[in-house]
Amino acid sequence: MRDVTLPKIVAKQPRTSISEGGGLILLDQALEPVALDQGASAIFRYPAQPGSKPEPAFEEILTLIRLRKPSERFSITRLRVGDEKYLCRLYLLEPKQKFLKQPLLGLHLEPDLPANSDPVAAVAADYRLTDREQEALRGISLGFSNNELADRMKISPSTVKVFLRFIMIKMGVTTRSGITAKLFEYSGGSHLP
């Protein structure tokens, strides 16, 4: 097995350990690890020191994969490793190049953040947005246009523009895409609500 370095998404706050950023493991059809990044290696302590076994959670997730029916899609599973909680997603990676003869399974682990880790709420708190500004910000995060926001908030499109301008001033950005970029930063690079 070889260690693979994969690109990392940079979150707003610095990470205190490698495992906090999640990890990726590539498994063959027999569910044997083919490659893993540093994050997965740190999470499961795999490969561990000679003679020691990987974290029991590694076997737990492999058991869950084995128990699913071939026709069943693997949904997101929550996993606890020590004090940390992770969301696990399984992907089938079909070979497109000649050097890969069979499909691989990609097991992606990401930190399972608390329910209160809503990026819109975090931005609203950090930048002291009013309730109505937060409502407009949530609409932006959902991709609503100014007119759609106006309909939902029961205000005129001109008032929506005023709210957006106040949000931009408070956040220190000059465009709607600047607002979206800040939200993306607060979400740790994952999708927005």
Image: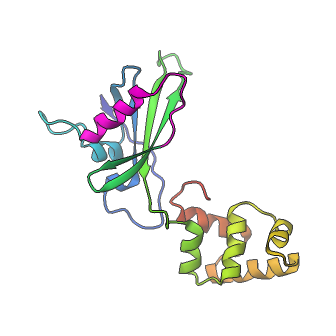
Give the residue at x 70% y 74%: 135
Q: Is residue 6 left or right of residue 33?
A: right
Residue 22 x, y percent position in the rendering: 40, 49
Relative height, residue 5 to residue 15 (above, below):
above
Q: Is residue 178 left or right of residue 103?
A: right
Q: Quadrant of residue 47?
A: top left
Give the residue at x 45% y 33%: 106
Q: Nearer the viewer, residue 80 or 25?
A: 80
Residue 186 x, y percent position in the rendering: 53, 66
Q: Residue 64: within the magenta?
A: yes
Give the residue at x 33% y 45%: 38
Q: Is residue 124 left or right of residue 141?
A: left
Relative height, residue 171 to residue 114 (above, below):
below
Q: Is residue 46 left or right of residue 74?
A: left
Q: Quadrant of residue 175?
A: bottom right
Q: Quadrant of residue 124?
A: bottom right
Give the residue at x 18% y 35%: 53
Relative height, residue 51 to residue 103 (above, below):
below
Residue 111 x, y percent position in the rendering: 41, 54
Q: Which residues are magenta?
A: 56-76
Residue 103 x, y percent position in the rendering: 49, 21
| Image quadrant occupied by the C terminus | bottom right
Asked whether residue 168 is in view, the answer is: no
